[in-house]
């Protein structure tokens, strides 16, 4: 069956990830995609895009980088996506991807992550102490983001005085991440914001690299990127700057949401919170359930290099394809009680960290930070109250909570 034969069915169901309806209730669209429309063609977007939802379909695309490339098709939209940050490995395929990722990965080996646990514990202790002293606080801006910014800036070797500017940058970039795939017309405001922020970040890292050349260090990723050679070749400053920008953005925003959503899950599933208090050994399964049900990155994009068929629908080469982790992680064919938070069920691996060559580089760091936050919560907090509805980003591609008022009661 070809695409045209499916067009009437596809047109019955459509959505836009930047729309108010999607942001208010993304799961209704995911469930409909899973049950009735496993392939959807979005007709009105600037960049031609299809969506897929089912676990095995998403996994297939992630593993086949030769058919489904990470390199963007339409570079005319770069200003809306990553501005100056285009020389990073998330937008590359092997072998260029392998070269850059292989070096950056040295900063995320288990031995390196373990060395940063005391830093994470100190920041978490300080932020939870602050929260407990307040009648109300902002879970995102006072706790979660402070832990993740403190960690990623430390790993990159950046001054703690720069935490606030890093937060401002990531707030702008999260709003624009993959937004171009859902726009129906060019958006000057978004494009100007991305170009401005990425230029500021490029200038910042350019100056910081000059500082490191005068004052060498050996305990951070940037220093490793500057000094390591592969086959006699060093990385260019532009490659280092783009990679640093990617790590700074990805290492902050997504883990902020993981920690925030873990706390929210403890409130929304009080019996699970009670179970966790009795058995802290379930912290890791609880974090994985949070990642499965509330992925920080709800979807990712690949470029279709060769015609590909899904469920009788041919997606022609030259289109983009949206892989919905939010749906795949709830696929009833794969997961028992897919919409329930249950840390006692042994589940197949979720796809929130993607897979294949682009499996999330920062997954070990994100899990460690979430583990430290969860342990601190159990050691210090008896009860959690959420005092407001979460203020969500206007970019539905991400599960980004901008603000959430809360109150902790101590033990």
Image: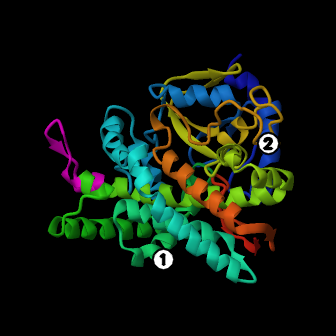
Q: Is residue 232 above or below residue 389?
A: above
Q: Is residue 311 magenta?
A: no
Sequence-first tag of 2 and 1 = 1
From the viewer's perspective, is the residue at label 2 or at label 1 nearer? Answer: 2
| Whether residue 388 is visible | yes
Q: In the rendered image of this protein, does residue 233 appear above or below residue 161? A: above
The Cα atoms of the two marked residues, 2 and 1, are separated by 36 Å
Identify the colour scheme used: rainbow
Residue behind mark 1: 164
* Residue on which disc 2 sits: 342
User: 69 or 361: which is nearer to us?
Assistant: 361
Residue name at image x 48 percent, y 25 percent: 67
**Secondary element at image label 1:** helix
237 is within the stretch colored magenta: yes
Q: Which residues are magenta?
A: 226-240
Q: Residue 22's mark?
A: none
> 99 and 29: which one is in front?
99
Q: Position of residue 281 (x, y in %)?
A: 68, 46
- Residue 411 is situated, as x and y percent measured from the top left of the image, at 75, 71
Q: Position of residue 340 (x, y in %)?
A: 82, 42
């Amino acid at each position: 069956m070809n695409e045209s034969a499916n067009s009437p069915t596809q047109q019955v169901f459509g959505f836009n990830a930047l729309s108010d309806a999607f942001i208010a209730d993304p799961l209704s669209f995911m469930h409909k995609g899973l049950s009735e429309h496993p392939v959807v063609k979005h007709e009105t977007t600037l960049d031609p895009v299809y969506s897929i939802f089912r676990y095995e379909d998403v996994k297939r695309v992630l593993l086949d980088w030769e058919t489904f490339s990470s390199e963007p098709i339409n570079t005319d939209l770069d200003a809306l996506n990553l501005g100056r940050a285009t020389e990073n490995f998330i937008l590359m395929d092997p072998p260029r991807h392998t070269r850059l990722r292989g070096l950056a990965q040295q900063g995320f080996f288990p031995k390196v992550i373990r060395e940063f646990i005391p830093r994470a514990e100190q920041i978490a202790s300080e932020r939870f102490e602050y929260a407990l002293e307040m009648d109300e606080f902002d879970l995102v801006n006072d706790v979660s983001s402070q832990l993740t910014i403190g960690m990623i800036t430390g790993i990159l070797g950046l001054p703690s005085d720069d935490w606030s500017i890093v937060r401002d940058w990531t707030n702008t970039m999260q709003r624009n991440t993959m937004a171009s795939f859902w726009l129906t017309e060019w958006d000057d405001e978004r494009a100007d914001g991305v170009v401005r922020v990425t230029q500021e970040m490029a200038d910042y890292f350019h100056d910081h690299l000059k500082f490191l050349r005068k004052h060498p260090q050996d305990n951070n990723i940037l220093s490793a990127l500057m000094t390591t050679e592969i086959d006699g070749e060093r990385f260019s400053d532009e490659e280092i700057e783009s990679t640093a920008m990617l790590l700074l953005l990805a290492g902050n925003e997504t883990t902020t949401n993981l920690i925030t959503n873990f706390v929210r899950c403890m409130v929304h599933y009080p019996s699970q919170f009670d179970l966790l208090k009795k058995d802290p050994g379930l912290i890791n399964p609880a974090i994985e359930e949070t990642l499965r049900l509330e992925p920080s990155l709800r979807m990712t994009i690949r470029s279709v290099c060769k015609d590909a068929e899904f469920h009788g629908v041919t997606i022609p080469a030259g289109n983009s394809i949206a892989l919905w982790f939010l749906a795949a992680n709830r696929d009833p064919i794969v997961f028992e009680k897919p919409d329930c938070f249950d840390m006692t069920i042994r589940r197949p691996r979720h796809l929130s960290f993607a897979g294949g060559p682009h499996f999330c580089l920062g997954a070990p760091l994100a899990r460690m930070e979430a583990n430290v936050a969860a342990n601190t919560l159990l050691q210090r907090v008896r009860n959690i109250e959420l005092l407001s509805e979460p203020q969500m980003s206007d970019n539905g591609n991400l599960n980004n909570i901008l603000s959430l008022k809360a109150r902790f009661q101590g033990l």
